[in-house]
Amino acid sequence: MRSAAISRPLRSGPVIFDNDDLNFFRHFLFEAYPTLPIDGFSVWQQASQLSHEYDFLLHSMLGLGASHLSLMAPSGYERAALKHRIIAISALNKYLTKPDLTKRDVEAAFGTMLNLTFQSAHMNEGLIDFLTMIRGCWLVGTQPHVDLDHTIFKTFGRLSYVERIKAIVNENDETNRHLDNFIAEGFCQSIKKLRPLCHSVAELQYLTHMQKIATLASTNPAESYRELSFLYDGLGKLSNDDFTSFIDTKNHTSQLVIMHMLVLEFVMSRKVMEGDGRATLGQKGYYCRKAMSKVWVQQILSRLPLKYCEYGEWPLSFIGSLNYSFDDEYQVWKPFFLSSGRTILVEGNTFTWAAR
């Protein structure tokens, strides 16, 4: 009879976790796991099996679970979420100094970065962290020795992502995945209005790319999602100085560019794009994460000098009109992705939906 063996010994030193931590872990496994990659439930079930080997991965899961719970209902878990986040970041930074990382090391590190990124998106003051962690994911995922196509995150690779998106978009020929023309045109007009303020290469490249994505979203959703997969690559490709300048809250033009990025990502990242049938299964915190994008847009506007505010009017009007329940995606998205209606402006420059 062959005896079972585990890949590595369990920790020799005891690590104390309490009942809240167990609740965070359970919540992560079934509700709070990142919504990427597509069909990610099974991927994150596999990733969780690495948690006994990598402290940083485990703490990132606990932190995300705690932050997710804190958004869904007042719970007092914010301090616990921050504690696990700090431990995860510190342990990961130390681990990444090791030479010759194995495939499992890469899987654990990349999974941790994704968890930290999504946790940032649950934090009221998390915008800078969110952008920084996206850059970190790109830097980890594009190292010469890293090949995501041969890891549990293989569906996160661009080719796999695009093929899965095409399959979902074309499934049953659902034309309501097209972005309403009124929204696409309004977004593009806002981009054009902002362009004269932009001078850096990063700002101009982002405006051009976002306009392309929005235009395609109303005519060719699959291609628009392919272009969307490149949106945040630019953060990783910037030099350290250029990245620091781009996310500087005193760089008012870049803040306006980031505001438009948030609105575009908000629209494009519908949870329905997860194709494994779990789109409405316990993912209420995902809509709270979208609500956080709304908070970030409002925060950016509140910090801008008055002369810049006109360039944020369209994003603010759009995101301010989303007074639907974030527990029900259908209510949120029916006005903006449709085949039998049109979006219109009503009194107060807010958006509403009218049947044809």
Image (spheres, rainbow, N blue to C red):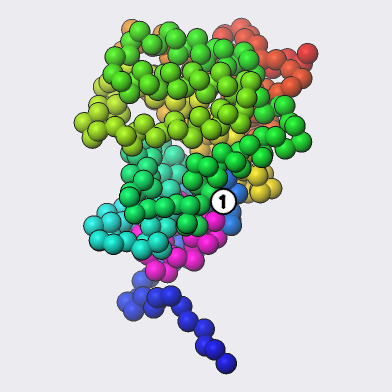
Point out residue 88 in the picture as x, y percentages from the top left corner. 34, 56
Q: Does residue 210 appear left or right of residue 309 in this picture?
A: right
Which residue corresponds to mark 1?
40
SS category of the residue bearing label 1: helix
Which residue is the extreme one toward the left? 241
Residue 225, compared with residue 146, is above or below; it is above
The one nearer the camera, 347 or 12, is 12
Point out residue 135 in the picture as x, y percentages from the top left corner. 35, 39
Residue at image location 66% in from the left, 15% down from the top: 343
Residue 317, compared with residue 1, is above or below; it is above
Quarter of the image with the N terminus in it:
bottom right
Residue 286 location, quadrant: top right
Quarter of the image with the C terminus in it:
top right
What kind of residue is marked 1?
Gly
- Taking the magenta stretch, the answer to whether it contains residue 53 is yes
* Bounds of the magenta segment: 43-66
Residue 76 seen in the current view: no
- Taking the magenta stretch, the answer to whether it contains residue 123 is no
Residue 307, compared with residue 239, is above or below; it is above
Residue 10, compared with residue 189, is above or below; it is below
Point out residue 285 in the picture as x, y percentages from the top left corner. 55, 43
Q: Is the magenta stretch mostly helix, strand or loop?
A: helix
Residue 280 seen in the current view: yes
Q: Does residue 89 appear left or right of residue 43 in this picture?
A: left
